[in-house]
Image: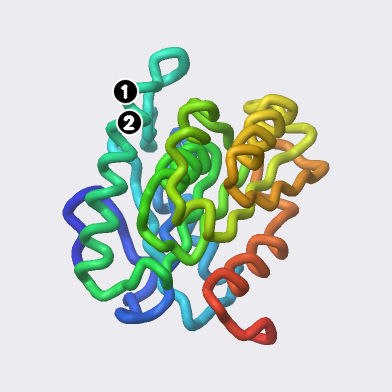
Amino acid sequence: MHIRTLRCEFATPPKTNGKLVVVLHGRGDSSAGFHWMPNTMALPEVSWLLVNAPDSWYGGFSWYDMPPDHGPGVERSRALLDDLFDEVEAQGFAPEDIVLFGFSQGCLLTLEWGGRTDRPLAGCIGVSGYCYDPKALGDEASEAAKARPWLVTHGFQDDVLPYDVTKEQIDALKAAGLPIDFRSYDKTHTIDPDLEDIRHALMTMLGLNPTSP
């Protein structure tokens, strides 16, 4: 199975017509930075598509330029995700069986794209990110986005993206109708220690047996 829109890799041979998690990494990282995730999540029913951002960034990749010049890149990457999901669906994955997961920059794209798309995704999960334009996103949020489950996590000790800024943005998105489950942790700019909550959210969103190994 080959994706042309963005450089991607399936972590294991994909199970077409099954469950899928699409993973968006953060600035300077790549798909290789998430090779650990399928094994850690231990969900054998699920396929994992690890996506590389379009721009080179010091040995890794980036979804958009540094603020305050990030607007054009955010909009470009949103359009690329539209094309990517067209391809993913054409290859047999139904949107209601797909969760979009993003870390840092990938979290921003999860919010900005996932909050607007009309596709009936199974859910969206964002970790240690923020929102580009919460007012515009709240105004433009799709009915599908308001109906699907969301999990967003952030750390009190995040030294890259301040906790208070992200919390205020998420509060605004919730007020606009996005049903975001926002969870806070005593952590820095990392995915730990919220892995068990992420795994539980994935199982719930994808309708998997909670006793899966």
| Amino acid at circle 2 | Glu
- For image coordinates 47% across by 45% down, the residue present is 115
Q: Who is closer to the viewer here, 42 or 120?
A: 120
**Rendered image quadrant of residue 130:** top right
- For image coordinates 48% across by 50% down, the residue present is 33
Q: Of helix, strand and loop, which one carries label 1?
A: helix
Which percent across, then down, holds residue 158? 71, 32
| Amino acid at circle 1 | Pro
Quarter holding the N terminus is bottom left
- Residue 34 as seen in the image, left or right of residue 203: left
Which percent across, then down, holds residue 189? 66, 37
- Residue 71 as seen in the image, left or right of residue 133: left
Asked whether disc 2 touches disc 1, contact meaning CB atoms under 8 Å apart, the reply is: yes
Instruction: Note whether residue 30 is visible.
Output: yes
Q: CA distance from mark 2 to mark 1?
A: 5 Å
Task: Identify the disc placed on residue 59.
Answer: none
Q: Which residue is tagged 1?
A: 72
Which percent across, then down, holds residue 15? 34, 80
- For image coordinates 59% across by 38% down, the residue present is 176
Residue 32, above or below 158: below
- Residue 184 as seen in the image, left or right of residue 104: right
